[in-house]
Image (cartoon, rainbow, N blue to C red):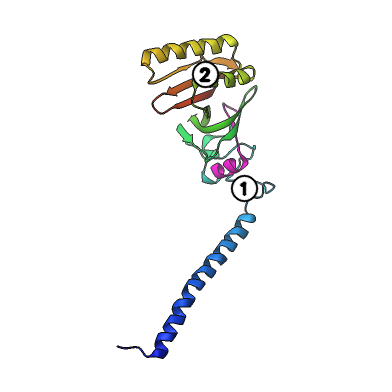
Amino acid sequence: MTRSPAQRRARRRLLGWLPITFVALICVGVVIAAVLMQNSWWTDSRRPAAADQQAADGTSMFGGPGIDYLTRQGILRIRIGEDSLPARTVGLEERGRQTFRPITPIEAVVVAPDGAFYLDLVRSFTVVTDGDRVESVELVREADGAWQSVFPQLRDVAPSWGWTDADLERLQDDLTVASAAEGGGVYSARTAPVAHKGAEVSAEVSVDVPNADVTATFVISATR
């Protein structure tokens, strides 16, 4: 059916208004989202944590809201051993091994019976639970691709983690031997566990030459 000139003009006016309407709706949506974000805990560090974001003793929760919250705060707080809250209370499995990868590097504070361990630039962490308690925490720290650069970092934190110069020299020697044995592929070495602050601690350096990836993993385990 042939449209009249008046119908064609009306149709053109309608089509002309549609893009403007869509743009206006998008702008309104952006404004609403901005207001909601401004009023959310993501941008208000003074707002107290909700029950599913932080446990009653101030340690981290590990459900979705808890991981979002610790990422926003930039710090993981966790307690190991008999003094830790039940694993299920903080959103962990009663028995298992769970790995978390925040979207940005974070700091970590692991509370042991006789003191706390601190580490920054943590890119992922693994929590091991047994008997509904946190038994160990593994913290993976960022490195710049050269394993030699890891050792100055280890020396910086060694006094607070219980390692001696001899421990780190042995680790470096073991890593050199592992590199030769693997022909420069994928290899690793770790320190022997040492007792410190009421826990057992160790460090492992892993090198993936093909992927130019170097990681330093710090392990804190409850003593039995």
Residue that badge 1 annotates: 50
Disc on the earlier residue, 1 or 2: 1
14 sits to left or right of 222 = left
Q: Secondary structure at mark 1?
A: loop
Residue 77 shown in magenta: yes
Q: Residue furthest front?
A: 5
Quick one: label 1, few (<14), some, or many (20+) residues within 10 Å? few
Residue 78 is situated, as x and y percent measured from the top left of the image, at 59, 32
Residue visible at 56% across and 40% down? 61
Give amino acid for label 2: Gln
Question: Taking 66 as reference, is 160 above or below it?
Answer: above
CA gap between label 1 and label 2 equals 43 Å
Quick one: label 2, few (<14), some, or many (20+) residues within 10 Å? few
For the magenta stretch, what is the residue range? Answer: 66-83
Residue visible at 61% across and 42% down? 54
Question: Taking 88 as reference, is 152 above or below it?
Answer: above
How many labels sit on residues?
A: 2
Mark in front: 1 vs 2: 2
Figure quadrant of residue 7: bottom left
Give amino acid for label 1: Ala
Q: Nearer the viewer, residue 219 or 173?
A: 173
Q: Are marks 1 and 2 in contact (CB under 8 Å)?
A: no
Residue 198 is situated, as x and y percent measured from the top left of the image, at 61, 19
Q: Nearer the viewer, residue 36 or 15?
A: 15
Residue 82 is situated, as x and y percent measured from the top left of the image, at 57, 27
Residue that badge 2 annotates: 148
